[in-house]
Image (cartoon, coloured by chain):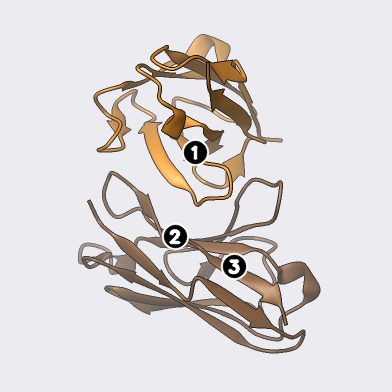
Amino acid sequence: DIVMTQSPSSLAVSAGETVTINCKSSQSLLYSGNQKNYLAWYQQKPGQSPKLLIYWASTRQSGVPDRFIGSGSGTDFTLTISSVQAEDLAIYYCQQYYDTPYTFGAGTKLELK
Amino acid sequence: QVQLKESGPGLVQPSQTLSLTCTVSGFSLTSNSVHWVRQPPGKGLEWVGAIWSGGSTDYNSALKSRLSISRDTSKSQVFLKMNSLQTEDTAIYFCTGLFDYWGQGVMVTVSS
């Protein structure tokens, strides 16, 4: 199974700050056939279902604010949230869908400083 | 619009079988995959398994000996069956279409 390692596990931020969440996979998620990275990012707020933010490592889902930026390739990926808003306080998960079984990172909890 | 809704018992006894249903609307099961994801209380997300548009299935490595996912396309329903339940299986179980559309989840508690 592909292991997804996220860091940090929690992050305390002030509104307006820029934050970076890291995700590392135990093997490359880049498929040579189409040059796409099979990596997604989700946001989950308390009591809610996860929400897809980014797929193919860097493509924002429709309706997701452009302050959410996904980057990276191969085994190292990053979710950057610029100018954090109060509504962004949530837990963020990365997930690989390169191969089954699909696997998630352990999550990064974004909290108010 | 696309909707998914999970249903099933909230309480299951240890060693018994869990049966959950995901009822889908606005979403073709023969064109799209449906996945099950679970989340133990206060913990992270765990992919449970999937049924693909063609009807084939894939399962979490740690659960595959106890797990079965099937569907009834005429009723737009996907089913999850997991046997030999233990307390560690206590979780919210979500079904999701393509990971873009999610049900609200159903809380399953394994307890005597």
- The answer to whether one can see residue B31 in this image is no
Residue at mark 3: A109
Taking depth in this image into account, of B22 and A112 the one nearest to the observer is: A112
Residue at mark 2: A106
Determine which of the numbered discs, if any, sits on residue A45 in the image.
none
Whole-Å distance between the Cαs marked 3 and 1? 18 Å
* Chain B color in figure: orange
Q: Mark 2 lies on which chain?
A: A
Element under disc 1: strand
Instruction: Mark 3 vs mark 2: tell me if same chain.
Output: yes
Residue at mark 1: B38
Whole-Å distance between the Cαs marked 3 and 2? 10 Å
Q: Which residue is drawn at 77% across and 84% down?
A: A15
* Chain A color in figure: brown
- Above or below residue B13? Residue A91 is below
Taking depth in this image into account, of A10 and A72 the one nearest to the observer is: A10
Q: Residue at x 41, y 60 (%)?
A: A105
On screen, residue A61 versus residue A97, left or right, reads right
- Above or below residue A44? Residue A78 is below
Query: Looking at numbered disc 3 in the image, what kind of residue is underneath it?
Result: Lys
The image quarter containing residue A7 is: bottom left
- Above or below residue A51? Residue A15 is below
